[in-house]
Amino acid sequence: MNSRTWKRWAAWIITGLIIISAATPGPASRSAAAESAAAADTPHTLTPALKAGVKTVLNERVPEGVRIGAVVRLYNTDSRAVAVPGYELRAVTTGGVVYTLKPSDGNPRIVQPREMVELSYMLTVGRADAFALQRLAWVNVDEYVYPKKETNVLNMPVTDQEWYGPSTVFTDARRLKDWGAPFTIPTESGELVYTPVRLAERHTPQGTTAVLVLQVKNTGSRQAWVPEFTVTGKTGQEYYPAERAESGPIAVQPGASRYLHFVMRLDAPQAWKSFTISTPESFTGATGTIRYEVGRLQFKPPVRQETQAVQTTYNLLDPISVSSTFRPNLAKEVDIALAEVRRFEQSGDNFLTAVAKFRLVNRSGISVAVPDFGVEWTTSEGVSYTGERLDVRQKMLMPDVGMLVTYIFTLPLSAGTEDQVRFTLLDGKPDSFQLPVGAVKVSLKAANDDAGGAADMYPFKVDIRSASVDSSGLLALDIGISRAANVTFDERSVRLKLEAVDSEGRMLASRTYALAGADRLASGIQTIDIGDRGQKSADGEVVIRLYEVFAAPGGDVERLVQTKRVSSS
């Protein structure tokens, strides 16, 4: 048996082994979502059993020259497993230059019945000039005849599919969408329809955070999983890869919608030019695995920049109008109302502290999780300050029972001249992104106008109804405390502090009281021994100060709420 005959026998034996292995079940690389999706993704006939299609084409400049990559799909229409044919895949340029691409070591060798698989190919050529690819060609090469015989089996056009890198600008209407236009990602879960619905930006001293929101809707009849893809924003000559806020697999039920949030961070505000959706690909060769991304489609930014609607006519304790669409952490059954606003300077601080209290009410018939939202204080000049939320141990919000949530703001002294403030509610994840979902404008003069002699400390009203000091230095205070109904709060976060000083400001006594719990302060007579009368000033006057004390993250914050002067008897 000569060498050529032996090679032919070896080829027949190998083919037989492949057919035998094809008859046994193997792991599926990827299941087709539906027969129609497979037909759209693999429109070309490669063999009687296999349909082929082009998923992605890469033509990207790298330090070594130009990297040509292609990912193709094969779909088995037969009822039996079929071996992947040993054809070569060649990339043909518009100028007629042919490049034979290398197959990835990870390419599957068998296609199970009704299964779709992906084959990855790549080649790096040391070429300095730019060129475009026209088609991918499947070629059957018979090396066991002399001269070897090449048969062109299938041509697949790739015009307008090439990805040259981030600077690529699609012109094909199928790959370039207007803002708000629904789209599907080519060859990816055709039943999932995406729509860009929001682009929100927040400007802080640390830079600009832009959040792109995509709505994804499952138009199919069964559960679908959001495929892995990335979003990159382009502004002028800069590119900003986005980080998806939602982690892990995301399932969308039939007929249901979900929102995907993509966060981009910029040094300063810029004008957006476009957004690109890309999918990850990989190729494994002798030098290891190369991972890369290929742009699939692009869409334009919104024509007008988003503006947040603001309630300019607002009364305390009225529910704030909150977006019904974008509130991932705010249950629709929960009303959020601003209950109290205070702005003050603690002694010696040389800056202002502001306190905003919000009442949350669960209007449903079941308990819901306490919403975690952020709050911004914005001045008339557009400068925003983020509030720090006081710790809340309560995790669930009971039906028809209000709950107090307090935010502390640190402001410059110049903010003390402001007559109005805008509060913006923010929803999302503080460590990744937050979106404005509602805003109100409040008159600070009206909000700080205490009625009568009692001090407002929502949900409390506190008043020193009478006070006296006897000759032994015993201070007697008649304190009245009333509390709004159906409002809970964390007793650790808010307390009442009482100080007694003489007319020259020397401390005589100090007590701190809880306003909730078993040891809370109640209405009635409180007595405090302030010691020898010689510790007081010559006029014998004692000054009583009441403070509302907040357990802020950076230390206690004290707000003076009432002062009363008492002459000794």
Image: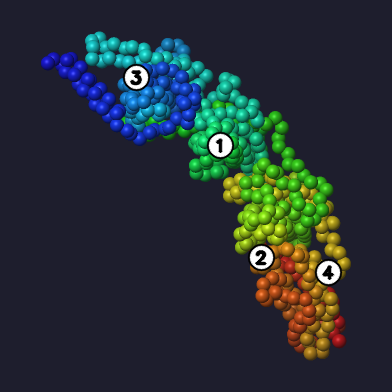
Label 3 Cα neighbours within 10 Å, binned few <14 / some 14-19 / many ≥20: some
In the image, 569 versus 227, the foreground residue is 227
Earlier residue among tags 2 and 1: 1
Q: Which residue is mark 1?
A: 254
On the image, the x and y values in percent for residue 516 come to 69, 71
Tell me which amino acid carries mark 1.
Answer: Pro
Tell me which amino acid carries mark 4.
Answer: Ala
Q: Where, quadrant-wise, is the C terminus in this rendering?
A: bottom right
Q: Which residue is mark 4?
A: 454
- Residue under the point 20% across and 21% down: 10
Indicate left or right for 243 with 74 as reference: right
Q: Are marks 4 and 1 in contact (CB under 8 Å)?
A: no
Q: CA distance from mark 1 to mark 3?
A: 40 Å
Select label 1 or label 3 by which is in front: 1
Tell me which amino acid carries mark 2.
Answer: Asp
**Can see residue 95?**
yes
In the image, 256 versus 275, the foreground residue is 256
Q: Are marks 2 and 4 in contact (CB under 8 Å)?
A: no
Q: Which residue is mark 3?
A: 88
Indicate left or right for 519 with 34 as reference: right
Indicate left or right for 483 with 282 as reference: right
Q: CA distance from mark 2 to mark 3?
A: 70 Å
- Residue under the point 33% across and 12% down: 151
On the image, the x and y values in percent for residue 539 come to 86, 83
Tell me which amino acid carries mark 3.
Answer: Glu
Vertical relation: 437 (above or below) 518: above
